[in-house]
Amino acid sequence: MKYGILLDVDGTLWNSVVSVTESWNIYRHKSIPEMPGFFTQEELFGVFGKTMTEIADLLLKDLPPARREEAMNGMMDYEVEYLHEHGGVVYPGVADTFRKLKGEGYHLCIVSNCQKGYIEDFLCNSGTEDLVEDHVCFGDTLRPKDFSMRLCVERNALDRAVYVGDTAGDLSAARKAGLPFIYASYGFGDVDPEKEKVASIAHITELPEAVGKLWG
């Protein structure tokens, strides 16, 4: 049996809100003159985990559709460049937890609603490039997260897989993909594990034990 652990990034493995806010405001100031002002970290907290299209519709709604798409693409491209240099805050224990899980025979993958290059920024900044076997993002598929989850499971020939995330959207996507879910309660979301009947971890280092309980 080939067991896979699929993981979200934002709020599950790191917090990049400060760097992303900085990068978007730099780009907004230079390249979106019709939108004076600044994005706040609070605004970004409200959209993390959504697709790029959804974020554009929320934060750039005052722009015409074609211009909105152009501006969003520019913001995302600049964000990848900025994060490569400045990074985000990787949660303590991520790399060590990944090594432990790999040592126990699990196959690690990342599935996110981000753009191309973002997961690579995380891997580079966290030093986990050699521990994560595959990653799929919205920028690759232009499809909902549940589609990306299924694609990741299929192309890695995983017999069983679980998704680890921190939002209600992650939980919903996992259910649509037919995967069990482990809730990262320390992240950005607000899921009631008892009501939803899902496993929960209060720190990434608790993941090996949670997976062990899930699959015995």
Image: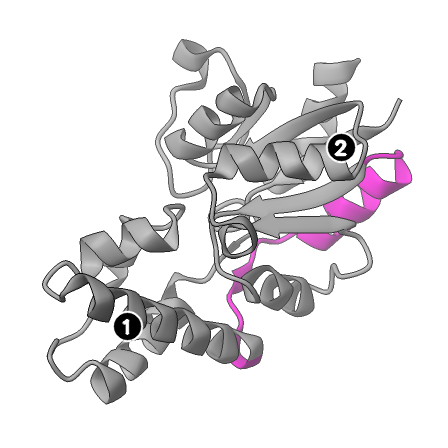
Residue type, label 1: Ala
Q: What residue sits right under mark 1 in the picture?
A: 71
- Residue for point 47% across, 29% down: 173
Which numbered disc flags the more N-terminal residue, 1 or 2? Answer: 2
Query: Is residue 60 or residue 100 the one in the foreground?
Result: 60
Could you give the CA–CA distance between mark 1 and mark 2, rounded to whole angstroms? 36 Å
Question: Taking 25 as reference, is 158 above or below it?
Answer: above
Q: Nearer the viewer, residue 31 or 38?
A: 31
Q: How is the image coloured?
A: one colour
Residue at mark 2: 4
Residue 213 percent coordinates (x, y): 72, 16
Label 2 sits on a secondary structure element that is strand
Which span is picked out in magenta?
A: 85-106
Query: Which residue occupies 40% across, 33% down?
Result: 169
The residue lying furthest to the front in this view is: 66
The stretch drawn in magenta includes residue 213: no
The answer to whether residue 165 shows anywhere in this view is no
Q: Is residue 119 left or right of residue 152?
A: left
Q: Report whether 170 appears left or right of 148.
A: left
- In the image, residue 79 lies at what x, y percent? 43, 73
Q: Quadrant of the N terminus?
A: top right
